[in-house]
Every structure is written in structure tokens, then in C-alpha cells.
Amino acid sequence: MSSSKKIRVVIAKPGLDGHDRGAKVVARALRDAGMEVIYTGLRQTPEMIVETAIQEGAHVIGLSILSGAHNVLFPRVMELLREEGADDILVIGGGIIPEDDIPALKECGIAEIFGPGTPLSEIVEFIRENVKL
Amino acid sequence: MRVDDLVQGVLGRDRRALARLISLIEEEDPVALDALSRLYRHTGRAHIIGITGPPGSGKSTIVTRLTSEYRRAGKTVGIICVDPSSPFTGGALLGDRIRMQEHSLDREVFVRSMGTRGHLGGLSRATSDAVRALDAFGKDIVLVETVGAGQSEVEVVEIAHTVIVTDVPGSGDDIQAIKAGIMEIADIFVVNKSDLPGADKKVTEINAMLDIDPGERGWRPPVLLTNARKGEGIPELVATIAEHYKYLKESGLLEERGLKRSKEELEQIMEYKLTRELLTKLQGRPEYEGAIRRIASREEDPYTVADRLIVEFLSSYKEESSE
Ligand SMILES: Nc1nc2c(ncn2[C@@H]2O[C@H](COP(=O)(O)OP(=O)(O)O)[C@@H](O)[C@H]2O)c(=O)[nH]1
Ligand SMILES: [Mg+2]
């Protein structure tokens, strides 16, 4: 196949919390790993995230969240992706998420949750191994 | 996805099919060319507007504002934002969408971010094909944002009917960049960030440069002041863009440029296809590798070998097609 096949990742920050330092660090790491990272900024609704991923032909969505609304926002993103027939997109999450909530999130289709302090190389590797191009 | 589905999808305004087609274009997948060849007769209707200028000069913000104006006028909009890929890793951070959030739920606005990658046919090939996909989809307006002022950006901007070059107050250096080639391609200059000191001075400077070198065209590029953050000067910009399009049509330039572009494109495609066919035939064959070694050891020269290989290729081609 063609040499210019590239992993395209949408990095989004759903919810209302105000800073995106962590998301930016991840975005840069993925770029440095040779991926095309579409960065969308703060305060994205699940509808906006899914529409962006569709238009951008994303293979991966990375959701970063600090506000504690993950139990609502993450499943909503998955639901919208299924409605659009776009649930082949790999969805991963990051931020501050209590251990107890993780099984339910995985149950609804989030492929992996990366807590604070996860080595960036681990995220890169996980994407490479699990993405469907 | 089969070519049929792709073509029907794009013509049926299915944005997933459009997104898929642009991905295939970027991946240089032959299916994309099949689809585009069938979509071609549905193109040629969009007004394509290029916008280029230094990073941070407000291009994305202007694109967002223009989009609001066009949507208010009932027009559909496609946007392509091109950012450089790293030549080392091939990765790219594409952040133009951050400024375009207000349109992200408007189904009549389609935004696509592209990295320059290492495209075979140059950046302009993939970008112009993506623009064509948006055109076939039925977008009335297609906006193409690229970072000025390198050669590839100049190429991209040649896709556009109307080229806007942005600048900001101060920044004396980029006048140099403008001199180095951007000047000739601008149909409209925008001095953005009119709220910053020195905005009027910048307008005067650009106008002075236009006085020195007005070019041979019947259109002198207007220099507009905007504050894109507040939306000031945007209606005037929209009106100027429309005026320029009208000028292109009435002067016959639109048709003339269309012919020129068609010729260039045809020749580019033939060159690409011929080269690809020739090399697929030759590469890996022992005679070819032998010839390369003889050139390296100075037993033969590349000019003669090239002539011989091309003649052989063309005559084998004739035999094949008469079979
Ligand atoms: N002061 C001021 N800032 C602006 C104006 N237009 C855009 N900006 C800001 O300039 C920065 C870069 O804008 P952006 O549209 O991303 O520029 P681009 O890199 O050329 O696409 C952003 O922080 C904008 O909010 C303006 O008219 N005045
Ligand atoms: Mg921009």
C-alpha cells in the first residue's frame, strides 16, 4: 500500500474544565511519533467531537477529561459513533478517572484509559497496536 | 468502500463518503483517482478562495468569519487547512480547527485539515484533488488556508480563483517574504489585527509596493483592514471577494485560467502516469540494474541509456496496443 498512509488522531477535550496542558503534551508526542494530530481545543461536546472525527477521517479519538463528567461524556461519544456507523474508530481516554469507573467505560467501548503519569511511549504503542487503518 | 459507493455517496452529499474520498486522496490510493475521474464533470461550480500569510496572522480566524457570512447568505462552505508535516517524522499537529468550533455542528460546513506529508506530486496535487472533492460534493465556497510564503504554498494558492494574502501590523520582515513571491499571487491583501498599533502604516507600505510594481493586470489588489477577532472589516472583505470573482468572469480571465489549468493538469497527469509505467517496467530487472552499474563505472552515460530505454519502452507499448 501507499507510503503516505498515516494514523490520524483527533485529540479532544470534552467538558467544561479550563486547561488542556495534558492534552497538548499527548498531542505533541503523537505528532513526534509520526501521526497527524487534529487538535480541537477546549469545551467540546460529544456531538462536536464525533462530527470532527468523521470529517477529518480520524482513526483514533483521544479524549482528555478532568472534570469528572467522564461517566456521561464518554458513553455519549461512543453512542454517537455507533449511530454514525463510525465505531471502528479507536477511542482512548485520559485524565483523572477513578479506578472504579474504568470497567464500565471499557464496557461501553473505550479501548483504554491512561491515567496521569502514563509514559507517552505507552500511549503511542497502544495506538499503533490497536488502530484499524 | 467501492468506487461506485464513493461516487454515489459524494454526489448524494454523504459527508462520510466525502471524508473517505479525501483520505484516499491523501493516501495516493488509485481508487481516489477512479472516483475523481467520475466526479470530474460535477465540478467547476465552487468559488475557490485561497488564504495565505504568516503563522498567527489570523488566517483561521478570518476563515471562520468568512464562513459565518457565507452561511448567513445561504451558501454552503468547504474548508481545507494545510499545515506543514515534519520532514523527519512525517507527523503533524493540525490546530486550525480550534478557531472554527462555532461551525462544527453546522452540517453545511465541512472542515478538513491536511498535513503536507511527502506527496509525490507535490503538495498541490493532493490539495487540489481534495478541493475538487468538495466541489463535486456541491460546496458553493471552498476556502483553502495555507501558511505563507514558501514555494509549495504559492503552488497551492494557484488552485484558487481568488487569493487573499494576510499580514499584521509591525513585523517589518514579512514585507521581505511578500517581495519574494507572494506579492504576485495576491488578489486581495488583508492587514488583520487592526486593533494593534501600526495597522495604517502597514496598509500604506503595501500600497506603496503596489505602486512600484502594479503588474500587468487590470485588477489592482485592494488592501483591506480587518479585526477578525471582532469581525470588523469582514463584510467589506466578502464584498471585495465577490467583486474579484465578478472581475474574473467579465474580463474572460476565469475562462483563460481554466484553460491554462486544464492544460497544466493534463500534462502533469500524463507525466506522472508515464513515469510510473516506465519505472514499474524497468525497476528490478537485471538489464536495468546492469545499465545503472555501467553508468556508475563510466562505461555508459545516462543520456544515451535514457534515450535507449525510452525508445524500447515506447516500441513495446506500440506492440502491446496493436495486439
Ligand atoms: N488582536 C487581534 N488578534 C487577532 C485578530 N485576529 C486573530 N487574532 C488572534 O491571533 C491569533 C492567531 O490567529 P489564527 O487565526 O490562528 O492565525 P493563523 O495562524 O494565521 O491561522 C489568535 O490568538 C487569534 O485570536 C485580530 O484582529 N486582532
Ligand atoms: Mg491557522
Image (cartoon, grey):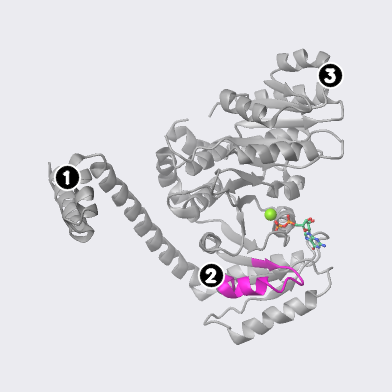
Tell me where the magenta segment starts and ends, as one range.
B165-183
Residue A56 visible from this viewpoint = no
State yes or no: Cβ of the residue under disc 2 lies below 8 Å from any atom of ligand 1.
Answer: no
| Chain letter for the residue marked with disc 1 in the picture | B
Question: Which residue type carries mark 3?
Answer: Pro
Q: Which SS class for mark 2?
A: helix
Is B176 a magenta residue?
A: yes
Would you identify the image quadrant in which residue A97 lies?
A: top right
Residue A91 is situated, as x and y percent measured from the top left of the image, at 67, 26
Q: CA distance from mark 2 to mark 3?
A: 62 Å
Question: Which residue type carries mark 1?
Answer: Ser
Q: CA distance from mark 1 to mark 2?
A: 43 Å
Residue B112 is situated, as x and y percent measured from the top left of the image, at 61, 45
3 vs 1, front mark: 3
User: Residue at 40% of width from left, 58% of height from top?
Assistant: B265
Question: Which residue type carries mark 2?
Answer: Lys
State left or right for residue B257 relative to residue B286: right
- In the rendered structure, which disc, 1 or 2, sits on the residue that comes first in sequence? 2
Ligand 1 location (quadrant): bottom right
State left or right for residue A15 relative to residue B245: right
The residue that mark 3 highlights is: A98
The residue that mark 2 highlights is: B249
| Chain letter for the residue marked with disc 2 in the picture | B
* Vertical relation: A113 (above or below) A4: above
Q: Which SS class for mark 3?
A: loop
